[in-house]
Image (cartoon, helix red, strand yellow):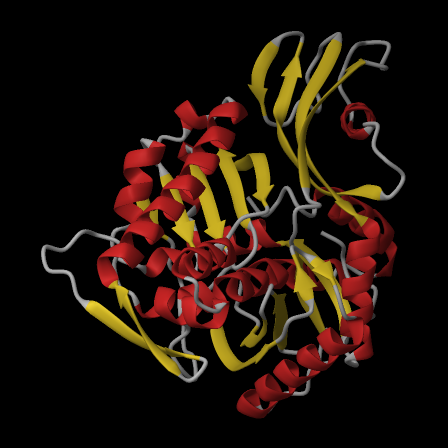
């Protein structure tokens, strides 16, 4: 995550704003800053539909900026707050997860490990080769190894010859992030920071206990599916697939010879993919003519396409090498999983216990917030509030300690979240 480029008035601002930019809509939430890591009270919300993002890539900056402005205005109206800056999300198939190893020889003459050695070994692990257009936007550390001894959390002060660490890095195309920033800035909103979408959504839908024991998080969106696997509270595997609910809609349209708009409506209105004994006819109007569709055939198409999607997910999870360690199974989010029978199908195909992800630990709100719409925005609020509270604690230290505190804060920013 990038920390904010805007100077914040910590004393006056008592709320936080999240802008979730999805494939078909912008969701904005405004919440009161919780005390410590408390419950989030939602003050305002806004949503605006758009068609400006294709698999995480901005297709029309001006139109996206207008959608952001509209959603922010609606959130301001319901909350009575004026948004100055916000956290936003980064998603798309350009996100890549990379495991990396670093090791150094202890520099101290007495072989005592210092903070300098920690910085060196982390820098060693982050020194990966990648194309010039990409950069590291997230890193998670899975402890240290001293002379072959694993599971060491803080080796400072210990004695050893060789220090090692394992990092999980996420890289992204910088131009895509810059375009998102530009769209937000043109809407008159300052940038407080950005957070990777699956990290944000899992922050609202997966418990710390589940992350510690090992769990697969799957978010099926309109045009992409994000897979994030946690072990010992840290992400260890990320894969973003160019598949989502829109692919299922297109297959329905293709096989029933109907427009995609009609296919999408049929998909949403169909409440189950499970077999029923009695078939029935569905009557729809297409280009001023009525056509009849068999519900049994629609269900068979849905079941086949969901099966294909979960088989692709299973292939990626098997390739990760971590699937056997996900003792808590899988949590699945997204509008496509609301349909009856989808979770049961996923469980049978993935060979894992599966449950639907729901927003957790949410306080007051002006209206109910459906998890498949607002989970990412709530996660942005949750993670963003930790950043804001960390900044506040730094500035309370006094000028003499600011530089040291800011350096340490920046170094540990992400790893403190999980």
Quarter occupied by residue 172: top right
Seen in the picture, residue 93 relative to 55 is either above or below; the reply is above
> In the image, what residue occupies the spot 66% across and 13% down?
146
- Numbered label tally: 0
Q: Is residue 19 left or right of residue 329?
A: right
Q: Residue furthest front?
A: 289
Residue at 86% in and 51% down: 403
Residue 382, placed above or below residue 163? below
Relative depth, front residue between 223 and 220: 223
**Quarter of image, res 287:** bottom left
Residue 169, image x and y in percent?
69, 35
The image shows residue 368, relative to residue 55, as above or below, that is below
Residue 264's spot in the image, x, y percent?
Answer: 43, 67
Q: Quadrant of residue 215?
A: top left
Is residue 359 among the parts visible in the rendering?
Answer: no
Residue 327 in the image, given as x and y percentages of width and height: 35, 30
Q: Residue furthest left?
A: 277
Residue 295 pos. (x, y %):
24, 62
Quarter occupied by the C terminus: top right
Q: Who's the residue at 22% across and 57% down the image?
A: 296
Foreground of the two, 356 or 117: 356
Answer with left or right where residue 210 lies relative to residue 13: left
Res 275 seen here: yes
Q: Is residue 219 left or right of residue 177?
A: left
User: Is residue 223 placed above or below 128 in the rendered structure?
Assistant: below
């Amino acid at each position: 995550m990038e920390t904010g480029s805007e100077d914040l008035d910590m004393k006056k601002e008592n709320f936080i704003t999240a802008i979730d930019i999805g494939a078909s809509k912008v969701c904005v939430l405004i919440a009161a800053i919780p005390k410590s890591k408390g419950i989030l009270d939602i003050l305002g919300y806004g949503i605006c539909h758009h068609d400006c993002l294709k698999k995480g890539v901005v297709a029309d900056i001006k139109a996206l900026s207008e959608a952001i402005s509209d959603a922010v205005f609606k959130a301001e109206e319901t909350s009575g707050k004026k948004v100055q800056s916000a956290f936003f999300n980064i998603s798309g198939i350009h996100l890549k997860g990379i495991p990396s190893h670093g090791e150094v020889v202890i520099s101290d003459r007495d072989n005592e490990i210092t903070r300098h050695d920690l910085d060196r070994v982390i820098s060693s692990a982050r020194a990966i080769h990648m194309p010039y257009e990409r950069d590291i936007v997230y890193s998670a550390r899975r402890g240290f190894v001293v002379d072959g001894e694993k599971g060491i959390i803080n080796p400072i002060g210990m004695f050893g010859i060789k220090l090692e660490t394992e990092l999980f890095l996420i890289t992204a195309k910088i131009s895509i992030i810059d375009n998102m920033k530009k769209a937000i800035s043109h809407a008159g909103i300052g940038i407080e920071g950005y957070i990777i979408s699956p990290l944000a959504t899992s922050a609202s839908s997966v418990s710390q206990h589940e992350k510690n024991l090992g769990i697969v998080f799957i978010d099926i969106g309109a045009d992409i599916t994000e897979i994030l696997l946690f072990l010992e509270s840290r992400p260890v595997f990320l894969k973003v697939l160019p598949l989502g609910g829109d692919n299922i809609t297109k297959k329905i349209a293709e096989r029933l010879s109907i427009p995609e708009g009609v296919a999408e409506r049929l998909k949403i209105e169909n409440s189950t993919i499970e077999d029923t004994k009695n078939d029935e006819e569905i009557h729809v109007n297409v280009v001023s003519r009525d056509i009849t569709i068999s519900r049994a055939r629609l269900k068979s198409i849905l079941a086949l396409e969901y099966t294909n999607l979960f088989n692709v997910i299973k292939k990626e999870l098997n390739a990760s090498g971590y699937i056997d360690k996900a003792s808590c199974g899988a949590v699945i989010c997204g509008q496509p999983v609301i349909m009856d029978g989808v979770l049961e199908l996923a469980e049978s195909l993935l060979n894992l216990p599966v449950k639907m992800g729901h927003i957790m630990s949410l306080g007051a709100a002006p209206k109910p917030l459906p998890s498949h719409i607002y989970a990412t925005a709530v996660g942005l609020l949750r993670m963003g509030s930790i950043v804001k509270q960390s900044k506040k604690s730094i500035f309370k230290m006094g000028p003499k300690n600011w530089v040291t505190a800011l350096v340490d804060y920046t170094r540990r920013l992400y790893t403190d979240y999980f």
